[in-house]
Image: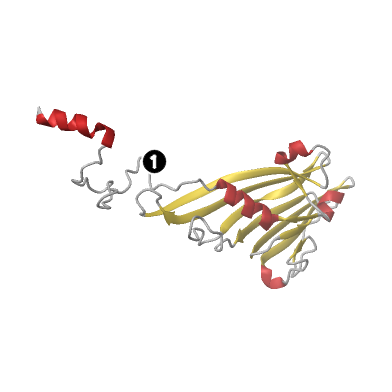
Amino acid sequence: YILSFTVLLGVMPFCSRANRFNSASFNKAFLNLLLTKSNLVYIILKVQVRGDFMRIDLNNLLSGVETKLDINYVLDLSNLIYSTYNPIKNGVNVVGRLYSKADLLYLDINISFDFFGFCDRCAEKVKKHFSFDVKRIVVEKLENEEDDDDYIVVSNRELDLDELVNEEVSLSLPNKILCKEDCKGLCPKCGANLNVKQCNCKKDVDPRMAALLQLLEDE
C-alpha cells in the first residue's frame, strides 16, 4: 500500500539555530512519508530555510533513519569584506541536498550570488554573477588527512553549513575584479577612463632611452 501525508512543522529535529531553531526561521518545513512496501521505507525530507545561521543535525541521516535532506536557503553575507567594501548585498543562494548512498553521506549543493563591486583597473561599477557546485562526502573522522579536500569532517554529528558556504564563497572570489577582460584602465596622468576615450597624455619615457630618443628627434 502507499501511505502519503504532509505535516507542517514549527521546529525540525535535524536543524538548530544556535542548537535551537524557532518557527520564524523557516519559510516551509514539510515531512513527506512516501511508499512503505516490503519493509522498505523511503523517507524524504525537504526544508527551505531563510536565515543567517544554518546547522544541520545529522543523527538521523548518519544512522539511516532518513535518506535525504533537500536544502534551499539564503545566507546573509552582507558583512563579507572584499578589498575595502561589502560586495554581496542580496545574499547567497544555497540549493542542493544531503543524501546517503552505500553507507556514505554525500553533500551536493549549488552556491550562487551576485557580486556588486568596482573594477580594479578603471574603478567603474561592476556586477557579476557567480555560481558553482560543491560536492563533499560527510564523515565523522578521517583516516588519512591528505584526502580532506573531498570530505567534510563534522563533530557531534552536526554540519555547520553557513561556515562551509562562507569559506567556499571567499575562496571563489578572484584576486582582481575587472569590468571586462581587456579593460584598459585609467590614464596614470589625467585619470581618464581609457575604455571611454583616448587621452592626449604622452607616455613617460625610460630615462635610459631619453638620450637616444632625443638624437632621433634631432635628426
Pointer 1: what residue?
Answer: 181
Q: Is residue 193 left or right of residue 173?
A: left
Where residue 116 appears, as percent x and y from the top left, is 45, 57
Q: Is residue 78 above or below residue 193?
A: below
Q: Is residue 101 above or below residue 219?
A: below
Where residue 40 appears, as percent x and y from the top left, is 86, 46
Give the residue type that dot 1 points to.
Glu
Hey, which quadrant is residue 125 in on the image? bottom left
Question: For the residue carrying disc 1, how many other residues have a C-alpha within 10 Å: few (<14), some (14-19), or many (20+)?
Answer: few
Q: Is residue 64 left or right of residue 150?
A: right
Of all residues shown, which one is farthest toward the right?
39
Hey, which quadrant is residue 59 in on the image? bottom right
> Which quadrant does the C terminus fall into?
top left
Front residue of 52/141: it is 141
Residue under the image location 45 percent in, 50 percent down: 128
Hey, which quadrant is residue 17 in on the image? bottom right
Front residue of 30/173: it is 173
Where residue 46 appears, as percent x and y from the top left, is 71, 57
Secondary structure of residue under mark 1: loop
Residue under the image location 80 percent in, 63 percent down: 13
Where residue 145 appears, as percent x and y from the top left, is 78, 39
Q: Is residue 123 left or right of residue 63?
A: left
Front residue of 103/139: it is 139
Q: Is residue 196 left or right of residue 102?
A: left
